[in-house]
Image (spheres, helix red, strand yellow):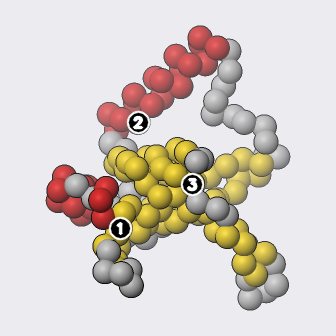
């Protein structure tokens, strides 16, 4: 099992859907930005929240706020990459995460995250905001 932690912005509003078995789930598209050789690139993640993870709190408080542009932090099981050809003949990769937790990033949570990065860097000397690969 590969656990993914992603933090990014929603590319569109989250959607409640139902599969052919009648199970409901929430799906969302999350954009993350990475820097590769000084050039910024956007990775898109398909995030699925299964019905058994959609608590009443998630449905009533979080889901209505999962709108385009909202910043989220997702932790979940990473699916296998799916590679497909685009209409112009290039290969594209689709990345999926089956969410265990989804948190909206409020200003308070963003400050806590920044402080955690600072403490980590000071204690280890490693800057986790820059990974050279």
Residue, x 43% and y 54% (percent of image)? 99
Q: Residue 87: give x, y in percent of width and height.
A: 74, 88
Residue 110 badge: 2
> Crowding at label 3, few (<14), some or many (≥20) Cα neighbours within 10 Å?
some
- Residue 16 visible in the snapshot: no
Where on the picture, by quarter, is residue 130?
Answer: top right
Q: Residue 15: give x, y in percent of width and height.
A: 35, 73
Where on the picture, by quarter, is residue 106?
Answer: top left
Q: Residue 10: give x, y in percent of width and height.
A: 45, 62
Is residue 129 left or right of 37 when viewed as pictured?
Answer: left
Q: State the separation of the CA atoms marked 1 and 3.
A: 16 Å
Image quarter hosting the C terminus: top right
Residue 78 badge: 3
Is residue 34 left or right of 20 when viewed as pictured?
Answer: right
Where on the picture, by quarter, is residue 59?
Answer: bottom left
- Residue 55 visible in the snapshot: yes
Is residue 16 left or right of 125 when viewed as pictured?
Answer: left
The residue singled out by tag 1 in the image is 26
Q: State the separation of the CA atoms marked 2 and 1.
A: 24 Å
Viewer-proximal residue among 126 and 95: 95
Residue, x 22% and y 55% (percent of image)? 55
Considering only order in the chain, which callout, 3 or 1, is on the residue closer to the N terminus? 1
Viewer-proximal residue among 23 and 61: 23
Kindly state the secondary structure of the residue where label 3 is placed: strand
Considering only order in the chain, which callout, 2 or 3, is on the residue closer to the N terminus? 3
Residue 89 badge: none
Residue 128 vertical position relative to residue 76 in the rendered view, above or below? above
Q: Disc 2 or disc 1, which is closer to the eye?
A: 1
Q: Residue 53: give x, y in percent of width and height.
A: 31, 56
Kindly state the secondary structure of the residue where label 2 is placed: helix
**Looking at the image, which residue sits at the far bottom?**
87
């Amino acid at each position: 099992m590969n656990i993914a932690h992603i933090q990014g912005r929603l590319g569109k509003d989250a959607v409640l859907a139902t599969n052919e078995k009648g199970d409901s789930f929430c799906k969302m598209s999350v954009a993350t930005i990475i820097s590769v050789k000084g050039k910024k690139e956007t990775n898109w993640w398909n995030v699925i929240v299964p019905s058994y993870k959609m608590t009443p709190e998630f449905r009533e408080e979080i889901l209505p706020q999962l709108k385009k542009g909202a910043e989220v932090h997702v932790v979940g099981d990473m699916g296998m990459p799916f590679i497909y050809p685009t209409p112009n003949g290039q290969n594209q990769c689709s990345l999926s995460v089956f969410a265990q937790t989804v948190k909206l990033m409020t200003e308070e949570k963003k400050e806590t995250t920044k402080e955690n990065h600072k403490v980590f860097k000071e204690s280890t000397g490693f800057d986790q905001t820059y990974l050279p690969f």
